[in-house]
Amino acid sequence: MLKTRVLSALIMVPVALACAWAGSPVFDIAIAAVAVIMAHEWQAIVQAGYRAPGWASGAVSVAAAVLAVPAPEAALALIAGAVPVVWLLARSRAGAGWSALGVLYVALPAMTLVWLREHGGLATLIWIFVIVWVTDTGGYVFGKNIGGPKLSPRISPNKTWAGLLGGAFSAMVAGAAVAFLVNPTAALALILFSGGLAIVEQMSDLTESYVKRRFGVKDSGHIIPGHGGVLDRVDGLVLTAPAVALATYLAQGGITAW
């Protein structure tokens, strides 16, 4: 299993970096395609066998990704307006609220990642990817080797406080390395922000774990050997991408950045 996970990662990481490097439209198309898969995986978790909300969420995610750069306000309005629409599509079934929540869960990170590629630049995007990957790896290594009190045993029995802090420490080290390469004068700010973003990333991971446990699902899918579904692989980006987009938006002068 570990060998399979490593092999899958060795394929996915270069592909993700290549798409980020290529920029629009390659990156936009890749994000839109991933979002469609995520939307269907989410609906399979919360409302198996009923596909209309999944198609709707996927369509909204694609549209939001397309509108992210030329009309971000319209993209946000579309996402917000789609939530009650998807709820109406699913209202006759159990979990309608969860189906509607899937729009935010999928479309918002898709939209913000595309927006960040344009307004934050390639360096910001790669930094986000590195922080997510390093946090996951550091959390696993520290948690497995140190152990100790569980972070949230009801949601994710394997996660520990040592893993949380180890992931944050690993992200801060990565942030220092990125600062050294990109902007040494901003090293302290980037190190602290990287540590904080690592906490957000792990809360993002726990969010998906909670949803899966709530519906008795082990993996969101089986599309990625050794990793499960796409949601299982990118769950750390669900909250981190919007968080960095908001910080970038504020740093660039608020609404004038649009």
Image (cartoon, rainbow, N blue to C red):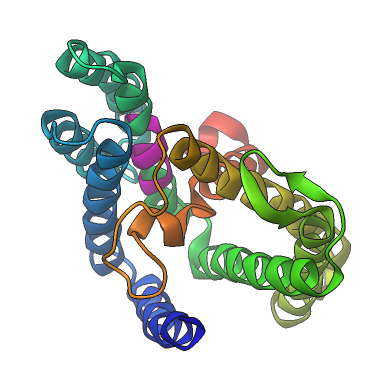
Q: Quadrant of the N terminus?
A: bottom left
Q: Can see residue 183?
A: no
Nearest the eye: 14 or 208: 208
Q: Quadrant of the C terminus?
A: top left
**Residue drawn at point x = 26 percent, y = 63 percent:** 30
- Residue 13 position, x and y percent, is 44, 79
Nearest the eye: 86 or 232: 232
Q: Main secondary structure of the magenta part?
A: helix
Nearest the eye: 192 or 47: 47
- Write down the quadrant of residue 133 in the picture: bottom right
Q: Is residue 47 left or right of residue 203?
A: left
Q: Is residue 29 left or right of residue 216?
A: left
**Residue drawn at point x = 25 percent, y = 41 percent:** 44
Q: Is residue 218 left or right of residue 221?
A: right
- Residue 138 position, x and y percent, is 72, 71
Q: Can see residue 18?
A: yes
- Write down the quadrant of residue 42 in the picture: top left
Nearest the eye: 83 or 87: 87
- Residue 47 position, x and y percent, is 25, 30
Would you say residue 201 sits in the magenta stretch?
Answer: no
Position of residue 28 relative to residue 133, above or below, is above
Q: Which residues are magenta?
A: 103-110
Position of residue 123 relative to residue 65, above or below, is below
Position of residue 139 relative to residue 225, above or below, is above
- Residue 203 position, x and y percent, is 65, 44
Numbered-mark total: 0
**Residue drawn at point x = 39 percent, y = 31 percent:** 104
- Write down the quadrant of residue 239 in the picture: top right
**Residue drawn at point x = 58 percent, y = 39 percent:** 246
